[in-house]
Image (cartoon, rainbow, N blue to C red):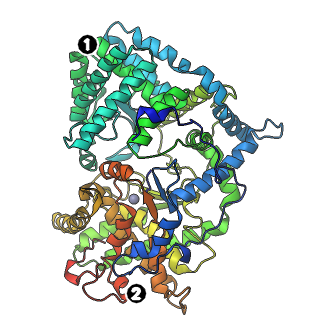
Amino acid sequence: MTIRRFRLAALALSAIAVFAPSRADDQPISQLPYTPSLDPAAMDRSADPCQDLYQYACGGWMKNNPLPGDQPSWSVYGKLAQDNQRYLWGILEDAAKPEPSRTPTQQKIGDYFAACMDVDAVEKAGAQPLAADLARIAGMKSIAELGPILGSLHARVISNGVLFGNGVEQDAKESTQQIFAVYAGGLGLPDRDYYFKDDDKSKETRAKYVEYVARMLELTGDSHERAKIGAATVLRIETELARASLTRVERRDPYKIYHHTAPAKLKKLVPGFDWDGYFAAVGGRPSAWLNVSEPAFFTEVGARLKAEKLDDMKTYLRWSLTNMRADYLSKAFVDEHFAFYRAYLRGVKEPQPRWKKCVGWVDRDLGEALGKEFADRTFPPETKAKTVAMTNLVVAAMKDRIQGLDWMSAETKKHAIEKLGKIRNKVGYPDKWRDYSTLQVSRGDFFGNVARSIVFETNRQLAKIGKPVDRGEWGMTPPTVNAYYNPSMNDINFPAGVLMPPLYDAKLDDAPNYGNTGSTIGHELTHGFDDEGRQYDGDGNLRDWWTKKDGEEFEKRANCIRDQYSSYVVVDDIKINGKLTSGEDIADLGGTILAWAAWKEATKSEKLVPIDGLTPDQRFFVGLAQWACENERPENQRLLAATNPHSPGKYRINGVVVNMPEYAAAFQCPAGAALAKPADKICKVW
Ligand SMILES: [Zn+2]
């Protein structure tokens, strides 16, 4: 249930401290606070649940939880994530004390954190950490030198993004093979569409962006005039890269981003680029094949290399490097980066406190070392056992649903059940923890620690090529308040962070737990069968196992969901892009239907009674709704509408229950009520 996660004039900048003053919640904690997963105080009982479940279940929460100044949005998930961060902060402060009793792991995470918190050293270093790479860019005599320089940047300084990105992935059609891949990238605005939309707001955003780029170029030594010219160059180059990039909706089609390519063909695709030098600098080469995710984009990279003046490419590279590293540099860089990406684009009022950034970076770079400390303290085996049992019931409910579908042939059902049987679930934390022993962390060198972490991760990824796939690997760290389905692994993953109150709550009855966590489990499971996931088989291979008719029947039902969500307004005149959100919307509906069935099965021999004035059925739905309570800044809503495949919380709840007759029955909603759709209008896929 992936949760998300950039106006301010230059005048306001000087008034903002980089490191915000302390607030009540600006303290580490040694015990996680408890909030029940169904919290009557979070409700607004004056609202009519037949008109708006979200307001009914979350109205109190929205009133009592105003947006903190450093947040673009605030939600039940976000608040729990911050509690987890404060708890990790406590662990890291202890680990940072240079006691001889520290374990090697504690020493590593503690020293990384201490170096990050040493703002005097970071301030003193200024832009110095970039100096060698900036000098190398400035010294380029021809485009022919770009390959090794870019490879070195990708491997050591920024794992991704300058001009394009790279990675190692499971071959989409041969999931047992790990292959090298290159991706479209190189854009400083949040999405390729930002470069082309011609409404007033989009024009304003580009104007602000160019001003921001110019200020960054000035910080790296350009005169004011030169920086203005440079910023226009950056926008021009990025616009051409954006034009050649697929849209987010197009990228949801796995066939559009899968292009098995021999290295020799890649060289033809981007003439003039030294791929050998690039791969040598990255530190690994592709085997017989690599995936060139967007060939048209790489053709454009070739065209840019030919058309652009060397000086203009240097400006673009200098800008990209500085922008992507800005948050790790001194205050001048951090402030500019904040002012554009978080204040202007996302409406955030103040920067995050330093500790929060540092905890986040330890979580990113040493996540399983820190995560083990977290899981050891917070995730008891009983919770694991209970949530695994819940998962099994949700999977069983899915099997029943598939067997009972009236629109799917027996042949396709057989394949669907086979795929379902092969899904692995991973709960809490990895069975085998990542070994960071080769990663060197120095207490006095924050930027160096970040860079060495990138090298460590690059090497860890490259080492996968040609080796068996590690099915036990996790794509999220244990404290993460999120969950995911991976189509190539065909597994569902629930970190410890998403299985604690106010989400999974061992103190409460089953109804809200199935409504909340049961639906999350069902959501991830349904991703295996959404418009994207259904194209992969049980072994994680992109392979069409559907009859033509069944595929068409599926699409008909998915279109019902797309049309429904496309009618919802996000902010101002912006509506949900139902083609972008359809996988998540299908998963939300399917997940809740599965959780309902699993809950009924789990409690069939129990006599359930009302609690807090809510019947058991009502508790299921209020429990469901309360995971999604949130407050959003309008600026952030605008950005998310363009980039986030998830619908806003309100529609993730009301948009689901409107398709469940069980909901209208639970609240005895009269015909014609907003959340009581006529039977013939109901959307249902799974
Ligand atoms: Zn999802």
The residue sitting at 69% across, 50% down in the picture is: 28
What amino acid is labelled 2 in the image?
A: Ala
Q: Bin the neighbour count of mark 1 within 10 Å (Cα to Cα): few under 14, some 14-19, many 20 and up.
A: few
Which residue is label 1 attached to? 309
Counting from the top left corner in percent of width and height, residue 186 is at 33, 30
Q: Bin the neighbour count of mark 2 within 10 Å (Cα to Cα): few under 14, some 14-19, many 20 and up.
A: some
> Of residues 192 and 104, which is closer to you in this image?
192
Name of the residue lying farthest toward the bottom: 607
Residue 529 visible? The answer is no
What amino acid is labelled 1 in the image?
A: Lys
The residue sitting at 64% across, 67% down in the picture is: 34
Is 219 left or right of 264, judged from the image as shown? Answer: right
Is 686 left or right of 159, judged from the image as shown? Answer: left
Can you say whether 128 is above or below 386 in the image? above
Secondary structure found at label 1 = loop
Can you say whether 402 is above or below 665 in the image? above
Counting from the top left corner in percent of width and height, residue 682 is at 24, 77
Counting from the top left corner in percent of width and height, residue 668 is at 36, 90
